[in-house]
Image (cartoon, helix red, strand yellow):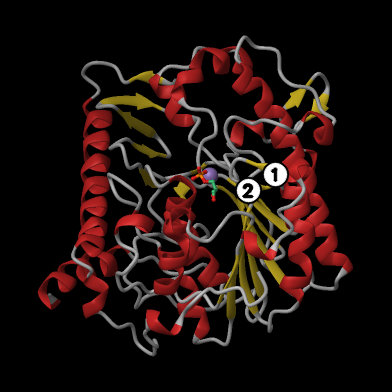
Amino acid sequence: DSNEVSEVENFVKANKVAPNPEAFGKAEGKNVIYISMESLQSFMIGRELNGEEVTPFLNSLVEDQNAMYFDNFFHQTGQGKTSDAEFILENSLYPLPQGAVFMTHANNTYQSAPALLKDKGYTSATFHGNYKTFWNRSEMYRSMGYDKFFDATYYDMNNPEEQLPYGLKDGPFFKESMPMLESLKQPFYAKFISLSNHFPFDRHEEDANFDTADTHDGVVNRYFQTAHYMDKQLENFVNDLKEKGLYDNTMIVLYGDHYGISDNHNKAMSEILGKEVGPYESAQLQRVPLFILNSGAKGGVNHTYGGQIDIRPTVMHLLGVDTKDYLSFGQDLLSKERKQIVPFRNGDVISDKYSNIKGVCYDNETGKPVEEGNEEAKKACEAMSKDAQKRLELSDKVIYEDLLRFYEPEGYTPIDRKDYQYVNPNP
Ligand code: GP9
Ligand code: MN
């Protein structure tokens, strides 16, 4: 009830940090495009295989002064994988400890990014080469207030060469999306969910034109090929946006949705990285790339420690939208006041100094457990775990008890999910 909302509200308000005045509003009025980069982890950025860059396009963005790149940025997903990433990004709430919130709590009241931006005149749409029922998206998107959902029925799914277990390959996906994107009223808020770089990273030998790695582990080996293919499709898409005259007025946010290489492949990963991958390294490997292109704010590489939960306030502030009245848990990645703590759904926590992994406190500088008797480090690790626990607990409460029903941000028009339906008129 409303008492419980106050508890969350008090915590959330105390946790809010002021936007960075040099970045606030720099992208005001621009279109927004999110691109979910399937299974892409940060260790691929800047990496070469046999003298060739795996992700040359993304690497070029690291150098691009119009682009921000966050190199200490982590996914925070749980069992809901891609859908958890979507959920975190658009609500700035944590996903659930068990199951996928898209499946279990699709009928809740949310105050999601598409809904918040609707009040600013934005049209929202998701593009994805899989069918609308996967991850229960078509139900969840109604609660999130998505105007349009271009699912697989909008794409040519008849060419077996272009089909993967989860849908359409990225090349034709981005290509066929363009006219649909152009049909949207501007400013738009659009999300593109790629899928070629999906486990088991198959069927891109010919169209990637890139080597596989040569560990004993085929999954890890092929990951290089599919990641290279995705990188190429991203480049083509951005070029296409430029050609269509859409680029200049659009801010583009590219993010890795979750890990691609699980702990089962630590041995091959040790070969790739040239160091033992144990619990500490495996937690550090949960870094996923985050790029923000063309926001109008200063670009460059940003080393702040953050996670997917922090994207919404970052993007909203770039768009000039104040977030102080929203019930959400992230902190603007560009704010100078932010607390650099990244809670994970498995209970681990990483900060800019320490990593508390399975109850062991590591020093990030050495990658080793802190010395017996280092009380300062122990205290810091305990404090950050407690803090993380609190955040997860309150976020879970918002979802389990559907608390946003009782909360209305200033000037916000609530979404009635009955107003939203995703039926393709010409399937
Ligand atoms: C399927 C795609 C992949 O629609 O989003 O989902 P994942 O298995 O990565 O959650
Ligand atoms: Mn995914």
In this view, the residue farthest toward the top is 216
Residue 186: percent from the left, percent from the top? 69, 82
Q: Dots 2 and 1: beta carbons under 8 Å?
A: yes
Q: Nearer the viewer, residue 165 or 30?
A: 165
Left or right for 422, reference 399: right
Provide the secondary structure element on which disc 2 rests. Answer: strand
Q: Answer with the quarter of the image where residue 18 lies.
A: bottom left
**Residue for point 21% across, 34% down:** 379
Residue 400: percent from the left, percent from the top? 21, 60
Q: Type of residue at label 1?
A: Gln
Pick the quarter of the image with the N terminus. Answer: bottom left
Between marks 2 and 1, how big is the CA–CA gap?
A: 6 Å
Question: Count the marks: how many?
Answer: 2
Disc 2 within 8 angstroms of ligand 1 (CB): yes
Q: Which of 245 and 182 is in front in this view?
A: 182
Residue 423: percent from the left, percent from the top? 55, 74
Q: Tell me the number on the disc at residue 163.
A: 1
Q: Tell me the number on the disc at residue 167.
A: 2
